[in-house]
Amino acid sequence: MKNILTLLLAIATYLPVSAQQTPAAKQTEAITIEGATAHLGNGEVIESSLIMFEDGKLTFVGDSKMKIARKGNIIDASGKHVYPGFIAPAKTLGLIEINSVRATDDQDEIGELIPHVRSLIAYNAESQVVESMRPNGVLLGQIAPSGGRISGTSSIVQFDAWNWEDAAIKVDDGVHLNWPRSFRQGRWWMGEERGYQPNKDYSKDVETVVTFLKNSVAYGKGKPTEMNPAFAAMQGVLDGTQKMYVYADGEKEIIDAVNTLKTNGVKEVVLVGGYEAYKITDFLKKNNIPVLVQFTHNLPVFDDDDYDLPYKLPKLLVDSGLLVGLQNNEASNFQTRNLPFYAGQVGQQGLDKEKALQLITGNSAKILGIDDSYGTLEVGKSATLFISEGDALDMSTNQLTHAFIDGRNISLETHQTELWKRYMGKYEGE
Amino acid sequence: MKKLIFSLCLFWCGALLFSQDYFPESEGVKANNNNFTAFTNAKIFVTPTEVIQKGTLLIQNGKVVNVGASVTLPQNTIVVDLNGKSIYPSFIDIYSKFGIEQPKRSSGGRRSPQFEPTREGFYWNDHIMPENDAIGSFKYDEKEAKELIEAGFGAVNSHTHDGIARGTGVLIALNNAGTDANRVLDDRSAQYFSLEKSVTKQQSYPTSLMGALALLRQMYSDANWYANGNASTTDRSLEALIKNKGLVQIFEAKDKGNDLRADKIGDAYGIQYTILGGGNEFERIDEIKATNAKFIIPLNFPDAYDVSDPYQAGYVSLEDMRYWNQAPTNPKVLAENGVTFSLTPYELKSMSKFKDNLMKAIEYGLPKTKALEALTTVPAEILGKSNVLGTLKKGAHANFLITSGDIFDKSTTLYENWVQGNKNSINNKDITDIRGDYTLTTEGKTYDISITGELAKPKMEVKLDTVKLDSKISYENDWLTFSFSADKGAKTYRMIGAVLPDTDNLSGRLILPDGTETSFMANKKSGFEEKSKDDSDASDAPKVMPVTFPNVGYGYTSKPKQENLLFKNATVWTSEEAGILENTDVLVKNGKIAKIGTNLGASGAKVIDATGKHLTAGIIDEHSHIAALAVNEAGHNSSAEVKMEDVVDPEHMGIYHSLAGGVTSIQLLHGSANPIGGRSAILKLKWGEEADGLIYDNSPKFIKFALGENVKQSNWDSYSRFPQTRMGVEQVFMNYFQRAKEYDEKKKSGQTYRYDEEMEVLAEIINGERFISCHSYVQSEINMMMKVAEHFGFRVNTFTHILEGYKVADKMAEHGVGAGSFSDWWAYKYEVKDAIPYNAAIMHSQGVTVAINSDDREMMRRLNQEAAKTIKYGGMTELEAWKMVTINPAKLLHLDDRVGSIKEGKDADLVLWSGNPLSVYTKAEKTIIEGTTYFDLQKDKAQREAIKKERNELVKMMLEEKAGGKKTQGPKQSVKQTFTCETL
């Protein structure tokens, strides 16, 4: 182990130290990965695999016993594992750099109903936090504004880019709606108890959303003489070209949200959060609602809940036949590199490991509507994948040797690895 | 109406009785009334236990002159025959706000905190006001007195409910006919304390419970010092405190835990407080009993939650539901355990609730004698007034109640409440019972009249043959007025007549429908018979859920017990030189690891087949804030005087959750609001034990220090507290340590010195007796802190967080300081911009003892996974990674001789894992502390079922309560604050 370290450090000394890794160049030469256990992200696994890609696209995914010509640069990955790039939905990555430094915060615009506010143009492709996702296999993300009732419109990006335009893989993919809560926390600074109590304004809050939806529908039917940016920005979710991501956790809220959105013309609804979704899986199935369920490294909301409810929640939903992805919307952005471990935690609860993997790959791609190119290792799809020394869902074995986005061999160095090597260099040199 | 009777009946004797001998009389001639009044043929409760079945009470000039079965009456005696009625001593409310305008919270915008006191010539802290004598602002409130009198009270003990030291109170007789000259029974009845700051004062310190406790300790210590004449200036607060020393000392604690905290302070300064409890004493009755304190218990029970909406019901925790169910047993449990207590209507929304709750307490098992004592003799005894209040013995104030019967029976009527010999009539005791069936004939028709209902408020039904007619009745001051309508309302007959005691019939004026005035006579056919209530109600005793340990969801029905255990055939991670041992047995005996080997004999121990499983030492979290009621004392830039041990919360669900993640020991640290924080509590997570039971025996001494953005208050609007820069932080330390050094030298030289708890603690650090866990981030400040320590000749024990430790790891190793770090946190504030997950590995490579800690309630329940991250980031071996959550934190906490590894002779703090403990796929199956299993996956499963069942049962009970027309409260989810370093 020490030897590997020294070797790594030796290499490191030749690398220039910079704030942000230079984005990798376009794939020019074919690449072949041979011998790895390939986890395809669709539930399938190939023990000893052969994977080839050219011009950023997968050209072969199969068994290494296959007697076909290996193309281009051949990577021997025997004993290693290959995964599709992990996908982080519903994040403000690149919209805020340091939580407590206001000047770096671009995640929450003023206003309650502002679907016209777009995350993409504020996305900082050179964020050090975004960069730190990659060594853990998190290569794609949905960048969504936060706050308010309708926070704005998200876009989906890949994490190795010169600028936001370069990063975008799906522009303005969806609108994000924080459903009202039927319980609210007491305003303790005003002398109320700190706990939660019924929100007396719940129906009024819901009514506000309904009115907004109805206005958006009406606006879309007529020929407006005057542009209303908010109503205009809602047309995509009404005609089905964009998805509506609705954030709700309580059973009542989820039912209200789904019913309200469906009856008011919203075509594609995705539930985000879903703490109590396990209680109404039949309802969700009937309405064909996929769930981007809250991450597992969470506490039970109620003291009487099972201590491991957050751990097993995704499994409960998967077992019921719902389409489920994992997100960590409520966690700090830097935590998103732990996305694979959230999935691993579901494996601890007995979900098949390949199914657990789907929660952050194939399923998420389907839910986000990028499954034509991303999320699974299938011929014709983007070569967005990585090689790990071991099981990438487990902390100690998630050790990447290579990662590719659209076939580009991206750097796994970060601000953090550079500091590591710099200071180890200092001590080794002494 | 009641009020009218009441005011009418304020008796004539009052004004005459209390004229003062030496006062000039300008409105007439002097005429004192020295007549006696005797109440005869009554059941008299001279005391709750001394009862005369048919006796006489003789009073004169507001005092009891005699009481007994046969009493000789002087000739000038007015005799009141109470045949069949009962006499009780009037109640005493020992914890009232009566007559004293209570300070209101000053409204006004939030400004920068105020750190300095506003007063001159008083104690340095504005919340210490023992000089505040309530008599100075006392104003008798007749209206409020009436309400109390109607509820049965004859005397109240009141004070200003504001501040931590609140000064003295007043004991008042509720004599609406008297003057303050005789009503004020004691103008310095007791001295009062609480844990809550004054609402009128803005001084920041103390911001926390532990700060309030430290302040009280320092106050007492300063008072002793002041009393010995050591101060060169005048302090009117301390002077008052010294003056009030001989009084009864009453402490407002309001919760079982705070009861114990208050008692502990009392013990330290030779004071036995009388404690105002909170109503939850039954949950920890053994410890409550052990205080030997007398208690004042508010008779305040929660309403049932409105759980009719199942979604909303889901927010109410089992703990809160259960508390609704169990709270009415509190007085009973106190009585059963021999705790002396008084009952008070303190903080009840209305007086009518007082009687309801009293009945409820009795229904839930409080013996009636104890109930009466709690309202009469006990409060009198607490106040040292047993000779004049609470009984009807000779010489006592003539404060007594006349009732129709047992005062604790729902159907009993309270007729009169006499205070200092003045009658207050509440219900007319001489009312004639007119209830019964009558016939009344007029205009050739005979009507059947039936009068039922309450004696003083009867109801009427009028029938012609079998047809019910509309009717009205009123009965007041012996006059009966009623009317009924015949012919479908076309004809109304109206009647009025005086009720005469000597006939059963009713008669008087009748006004016919056409206005003709005539007379009526209603002849009584039969008397009224009260439907006898089924006395078999007793078998219907309310169902009370058992108290668990702790008394929350997932609490155990009995405290878990220590067992001798033999783990067979486990993979044992020793965290020692021995490394990881395959197929190994571990024998646990008497809470210790007795033997490690193969093929060990059970010798009576319970055998656990651990084949395929992994056994490790329990995880130790060097940096945690769970199980605390407060985390920061932010009122000063140093708070070394505060102790986290004072605010341990043994009922915190974080304990159970952490056990489920394999954690057995934690350092409960003070937060990072100030450079010098408070002293740590080092705990074992013994779920079910009380607070002190969690704290390590012979605990190593630790204190939290902090550096950087938090202590500079960089991330919130606070610009007035020193320090605002890292430069200032150094100066805080230099100054405090220099002062501590000088303090210690003075103390050791034998000179007189003022005991200063804060300086004592800092001197311990300099003397190497107490260790620092220092919150730190950037390299400059880390380096500074080590230099400060070196200057004063000690070493920093641990840097916690220490996210730039990797930049100065060599210097740290040289200094000899350890590190407790996050595995991978960064980017949450500016000073963690250069935080890297390789930190632990780099520091380790330079010889620093490194632990991975949480500072987070969620992360701490999977520290095994956090340790695994050091393998990913920096290439630690599994063995070394595992040490980072076991033996390394044990070393940092100076506990490595007791816990942190599997070694013969050490505490049996063990975790049985389903697989490799560093894997994300592994679960803790059993978590054991000193041979006692505190978490077990199987038991947990059973607990889940039990919770479901009990919740369902309680929901049903609450629905019934609502259906029965009882008041309910809205559903709510009470949440305990989740603390991190930065929580203020």
Image (cartoon, coloured by chain):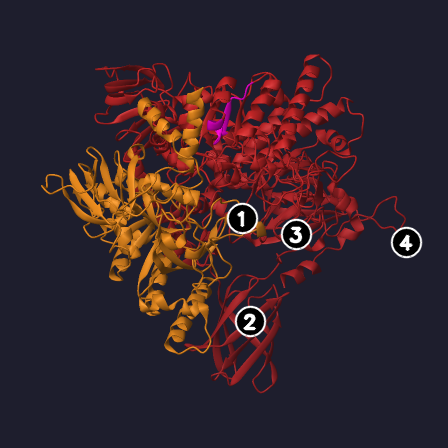
Chain colours: A orange, B red
The residue at the far left in this view is: A67
| Residue B309 visible here | no
The three-letter code of the residue at mark 1 reads Arg
Is residue B740 among the parts visible in the rendering?
yes
Q: Are marks 3 and 2 on the same chain?
A: yes
Task: Provide the residue designation for mark 1.
Answer: A102
Q: Which residue is mark 2?
A: B473
Task: Check disc 4 and report the residue beneath it.
Answer: B26
**The disc numbered 2 marks a residue on which chain?**
B
The CA span between labels 3 and 2 is 57 Å
Query: Mark 3 or mark 1, which is nearer to you?
Result: 1
Circle 3: element type: loop
Disc 2 from disc 1: Cα separation? 74 Å
Left or right for B443, reference B657: right
Q: Chain of mark 4?
A: B
Question: CA separation, marks 4 and 2?
Answer: 48 Å
Magenta segment: B795-807
Could you say which is closer to the camera, residue B543 or residue A132?
Answer: A132
SS state under label 1: helix
**Residue B959 coordinates in the image, percent (x, y):** 39, 55
- Numbered mark located on residue B574 in the image: none
Which chain letter goes with mark 3? B
Gap in angstroms between the C-alphas marked 3 and 4: 55 Å
Q: Amino acid at mark 2?
A: Ile
| Label 4 and label 2 in one chain | yes
- Looking at the image, residue A273 sits to the left or right of residue A41; the answer is right
Do marks 2 and 1 share a chain? Answer: no
Q: Earlier in the sequence, mark 3 or mark 4?
A: 4
- Reply yes or no: does residue B158 show up in magenta: no
- Between disc 2 and disc 1, the foreground one is 1
Is disc 1 surrounded by few (<14), some (14 to 19) or many (20+) residues within 10 Å? few
Asked whether the beta carbons under mark 3 and mark 2 sit within 8 Å of each other, the answer is no
